[in-house]
Image (cartoon, rainbow, N blue to C red):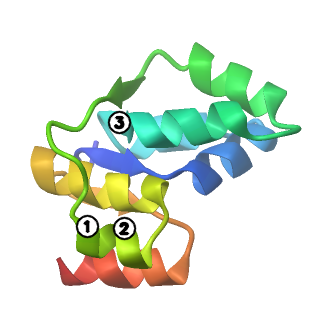
């Protein structure tokens, strides 16, 4: 496996929606989600099947941040993306999975 991955909401919902969530498990280990991402998935409409698939994936871990994301991140990104970057820094993750261009750009710069 290629190391620790911290994921945002969109990619997980997309992969679960096409029943291909296991692709992540085949490439990365472990895979973690910040609590904010888990909460976004639960609040989303019309993604009950994706939620069930994500919950059933015991290899996806949910984690609480030890500190709130940097306020500068929160000025530019939503709470999910900011939490992904904060958790990646906190855990020294090798990879982040963010679907929005702005989030990817910021993640590559920190």
- Of residues 8 and 79, which is closer to you in this image? 79
Q: Residues within 10 Å of mark 3 (few under 14, many from 20)?
A: many
Q: Is residue 41 left or right of residue 72?
A: right
Q: Position of residue 51 (x, y in %)?
A: 70, 27
Label 2: which secondary element: helix
For image coordinates 63% across by 55% down, the residue present is 10
Q: Quadrant of the rendered structure where residue 41 is?
A: top right
SS category of the residue bearing label 1: helix
Q: Is residue 88 above or below residue 24?
A: below
Which residue in the structure is indicated by mark 3?
32
How much space separates mark 2 and mark 1, taking CA atoms? 5 Å
* Quarter of the picture holding the N terminus: top left
| Comes first in the chain, label 3 or label 2 | 3
Q: Residue at x 75, y 40 (%)?
A: 44
Residue that label 2 marks:
74
Q: Is residue 10 above or below residue 48?
A: below
Disc 2 crowd rating (10 Å Cα; few below 14, some 14-19, many 20+) is: some
Please tell me whether residue 94 is drawn above or below residue 61 in the rendered image.
Answer: below
How far apart in space, not on screen, are marks 3 and 2 (Cα)?
A: 20 Å
Pointers 2 and 1 in contact (CB under 8 A)? yes
Decide if residue 92 is in sight here.
Answer: no
Q: Which residue is mark 1?
A: 71
The tag earlier along the polypeptide, 3 or 1, is 3
């Amino acid at each position: 496996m290629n190391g620790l991955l911290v994921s945002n909401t969109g990619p997980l919902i997309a992969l679960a929606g096409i029943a291909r969530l296991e692709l992540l498990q085949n490439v990365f280990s472990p895979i973690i989600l910040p609590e904010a991402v888990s909460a976004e998935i639960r609040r989303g409409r019309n993604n009950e099947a994706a939620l069930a698939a994500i919950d059933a994936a015991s290899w996806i871990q949910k984690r609480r941040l030890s500190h709130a994301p940097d306020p500068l991140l929160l000025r530019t990104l939503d709470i999910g993306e900011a939490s992904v970057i904060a958790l990646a820094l906190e855990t020294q993750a090798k990879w982040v999975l963010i679907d929005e261009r702005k989030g990817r750009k910021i993640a590559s710069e920190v």
